[in-house]
Image (cartoon, coloured by chain):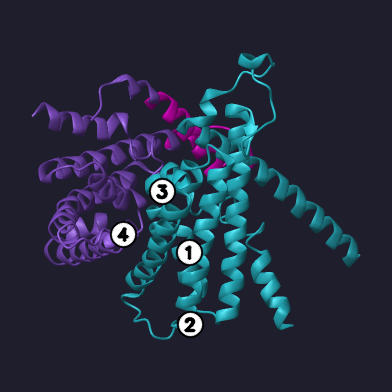
Amino acid sequence: MKENVLVKDTLKGLWDENPVFRQLLGMCPTLAVTNAAIFGLSMGLATSFVLLCSSFIISIFRKVFLHEVRTASFVVIIATFVTIVDLFLKGNYPEISKALGPYIPLIVVNCLILARQEAFASKKPVLRAIADALGMGIGFTIALIMLGSIRELLGSGTVFGFRILSLIAKGGWFRPWGIMLLPAGAFLTLGTMIGIINILSEKNSKNRSVVEERRQH
Amino acid sequence: MSEFLLIFISAILVNNFVLKYFLGICPFIGVSDEVTASLNMGMAVTFVMTLTAPFVWLINTYILARFNLPFLEYVTDIIVIASLVQLVEMFIKKYSRGLYNTLGIYLPLITTNCAILFSALFLVLRNYNFIQSIIFGFGSGIGFTLAIVIMAGIREELEYADVPKPFKGAAITLLVAGLMALAFMGFAGMPSA
């Protein structure tokens, strides 16, 4: 039974409450860094790490925080872990750190992280908080990779740096859509994806309700 | 003088915070369904941004740089922003009831508005001096207000449009933002700071 709850806490972040597509949380990094799949992956992992660590700490000390200053306390804890991630990336992956630039420190104010602390970690026991953070982190990372892959594929014909569509300049047929790499492309791609996901989940819930109706009869 | 003007104009149009750097997207989508509400939100952001810029500059120059503590930057920045927001909220609650009623509900949201933290980080990154920082903070706030108010105007009209149901709400807002970003790309040719 208990494991069941943990699995549920983890899985809900992947689709039903996906932070990007369903809850619209953490939009700034989602839009800003996804002009290539690899940046989406790095940003997703960095955010997941911070989310996991701060959920863990905040859940342990959840009874200590004063109600009035809890947001400030959460933010300071989050900022500490973000500093760790930032120094780690600067030391080990200087190229990625340079490309993501100021969006790494902006993880501090990523509303996804703060929202999970406020809604979940500060109220639930440690194991459930970790399960929730894990699910949300994975859901966020998957969304960023999807968005990054689509934009990279249409904008430069590659995914994770591997060439998929051959360019006209090199004797192929594909003319890259320059706009996909620009800010406007980010808004358009995400808007279209959210619309498509709404259509899909509507169909899903219709199917489900039809099945349930049949069961009842 | 022209240098200040350049920083100001480029913060508003060329490097618009919302449409170029994707900052403050959450309020941009969340609050932008009504012109007055988004104007108030924009004013609150501009106010806090103009105030944080000089404080962050002073702390960075006279404390962090002097004692060689740059790794504390994120923590101090966020503490400055959170405490300033708290202070402003208490101040206007006591002295201006009218202002509190218009800005009050937006102030707590501002602590986690990434535009504010970004402007704090940016002015350190760009090595702006004291006055330039204030102008940059103010200009960025105005740029945010401009984008969110235009968006609210469009969304008020969208109410009457026949948008396919799955695209209602966030999806159509993002698509409209995409078109706005395209339009703002026209400013990219202007000289910028």
Q: Mark 2 points at which residue?
A: A60
Q: Distance between the residues labelled 3 and 1?
A: 14 Å
Q: Chain A is drawn in which colour?
A: cyan
Residue at position x 46%, y 70% in the image: A54
Residue farthest to the bottom, as pictured: A63
Q: Which of marks 1 and 2 is nearer the N terminus?
A: 1
Q: Please, what secondary structure does the residue beneath circle 4 have?
A: helix
Left or right of residue A29, residue A105 in this image: left
Q: How far apart are marks 3 and 2 (CA)?
A: 28 Å
Q: Distance between the residues labelled 1 and 2?
A: 15 Å
User: Which chain comes out purple in the rendered image?
Assistant: B
Q: Name the residue under label 1.
A: A50
Residue nearer the viewer, B34 or B86: B86
Residue nearer the viewer, A11 or B157: A11
Residue at position x 58%, y 34% in the image: A151
Q: Earlier in the sequence, mark 3 or mark 1?
A: 1
Q: Name the residue under label 4.
A: B74
Q: Point out the image quarter for the C terminus of chain B.
A: top left
Q: Is residue A52 magenta?
A: no
Badge 3 and badge 1 both on one subunit: yes
Crowd rating for badge 2 (residues with CA inside 10 Å; few <14, some 14–19, many 20+): some
Total of numbered circles in the picture?
Answer: 4
Q: Earlier in the sequence, mark 3 or mark 2?
A: 2
Badge 4 and badge 2 both on one subunit: no
Span shown in magenta: B156-184
What amino acid is found at the position of numbered circle 1 in the picture?
Val
